[in-house]
Amino acid sequence: MLHRLTLSALRDEIARGHATPLEVVDDYLARIASVNPAVNAFVAIYADRARERAREPLSGPLAGVPVSIKDSFDVAGQPTYCGSRFRLEHRAKDDATCVARLEAAGAIVIGKTNTPEFLANYESDNHLTGRSNNPWNLERTPGGSSGGEAAAISAFCSAGGMGSDGGGSVRWPAHACGIAALKPTPGRVPATGHEPRIAHPGGLLGVAGPMARNARDLRILYDVVAGHDDQDPFSVPMEGPPARSTKIGFAERFGEVPVAAEIAAAVQDCARICADTLRLPTEAWTPEGLEKSPNLWSFFFSELPAEFMRDTIAGHEADAHWTGTELLEQLAGRPLPTAKQVVLNLAARDRMRAHLLRQMRDYGVLLWPVAGTTAFAHRARRYPTPTKEIGLFQAMMPLYPANLLGLPAVVIPWTLSSEGLPIGIQLIGRPWEEDLLLQLAGQLEDARGPLPELPL
């Protein structure tokens, strides 16, 4: 049952000689063989490669620990499909920077995990691998676009790994599958070797981020993969500034958009623990000036790249998958963005960011829901709340400000719903203050106590 250990406990078992890397890899491969046919988290399983590496002398903070990689990061010699038939001929020349750093730290890449086509959906399904399922309920989605990665970690098929986040793509799957994830500040974790390339303009929103079962494991992975890389145009050679205020401002929802009652209750419960157990200044607070942030995010994430996606599938529409075209269909008939719109929206984004950061001089951390719903049934697009049904765009609104404004955010599992589905909470910080968020996330997990185990 080595696969049931946390990443930190597993590496300690290996370091003490209580288990060999080969025994660990074999245990994980047996778990994958047992569970993956139902969960379908993996695009590829590197059994021979993992066993060969496990027989080598390994050193470093992750020596012998099996990890998985979202199939949007390059692994040398392997395809990076991004869920699309349009990339069938692709073979990576080099490892992505985060993959190289994980292996340099002694980790063993055990496989690559499933995504929606072009990473363009909140569900993970495509023509190549098919649909990934949530380990907590196979009739529910594990989320997207890092849904296969979250499902693999949640199902004890991986000790941790890497995802990417342009609109909640590590945080929403973490919430849906009951694991932890970090969306770092752009430039903190190199995204070199990610497809699509996380550079201008997409790198304003998108980042590479670690995923694990808890915040302390997340910290271990973050310490390995973070750091300057001159091949990433956003990367910066700096340490984070000292944290100023640890005052926490919490809100049960984004603006006036309602969320499921149990999600609001989870935020309230977490705020109570922040105040009563951790003795941190905590109060209800809704930032001003974020009302248009979902629309600005949608412009940069959906409208601006839409024409490039249309060009990619032009003449081969039958080969495209619904997860890659759902957003395109919603944008049908809209005029192409103009250069003037791009400039004006960038300026609006910068003003909004500056306004929020002035407010966050007093509030060091925002405590928010991750989304308005728990893991939903595959392809469901309406979700109940106490006051009205909400749609997908509304349900994901708590995710967008961190991407649009370049803020770090951590998700940790908090409780289970009455349906037995995970509910996470989201901590959002100021740029470069990942250390504060990860420290607080670990303290909250300790105060929260253990959660029920996955029944699978």
Image (cartoon, rainbow, N blue to C red):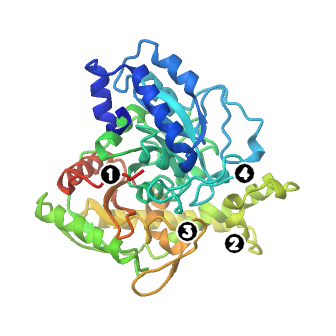
Q: Relative to residue 314, is residue 397 drawn left or right?
A: left
Marking on residue 453? 1
Question: As shown in the figure, which amino acid type bears the numbered disc 2?
Answer: Gln
Local SS, label 2? helix
Look at the numbered discs 2 and 4 and tell me whether their residues touch, using CB distance below 8 Å: no
N-term-proximal mark, 2 vs 4: 4
Tell me if mark 1 has few (under 14), some (14-19) or many (20+) residues whose alpha carbon lies within 10 angstroms of its own: few
Q: Relative to residue 22, is residue 306 drawn left or right?
A: right
Local SS, label 3? helix
Q: Nearer the viewer, residue 337 or 216?
A: 216
Q: Residue furthest right?
A: 315
Q: Nearer the viewer, mark 2 or mark 3?
A: 2
Look at the numbered discs 1 and 2 and tell me whether their residues touch, using CB distance below 8 Å: no
Figure quadrant of residue 194: top right
Tell me if mark 2 has few (under 14), some (14-19) or many (20+) residues whose alpha carbon lies within 10 angstroms of its own: few
Examine the rendering and report whether any part of residue 143 can be seen. yes
Residue where numbered disc 4 is placed: 127
> Residue, x 19% and y 50% (percent of image)?
446
Q: CA gap, disc 3 to disc 4? A: 31 Å
Question: As shown in the figure, which amino acid type bears the numbered disc 4?
Answer: His
Q: Nearer the viewer, mark 1 or mark 3?
A: 1
Give the quarter of the figure containing the N terminus.
top left
Q: Is residue 118 above or below residue 251?
A: above
> Residue, x 69% and y 58% (percent of image)?
324
Q: CA gap, disc 2 to disc 3? A: 16 Å
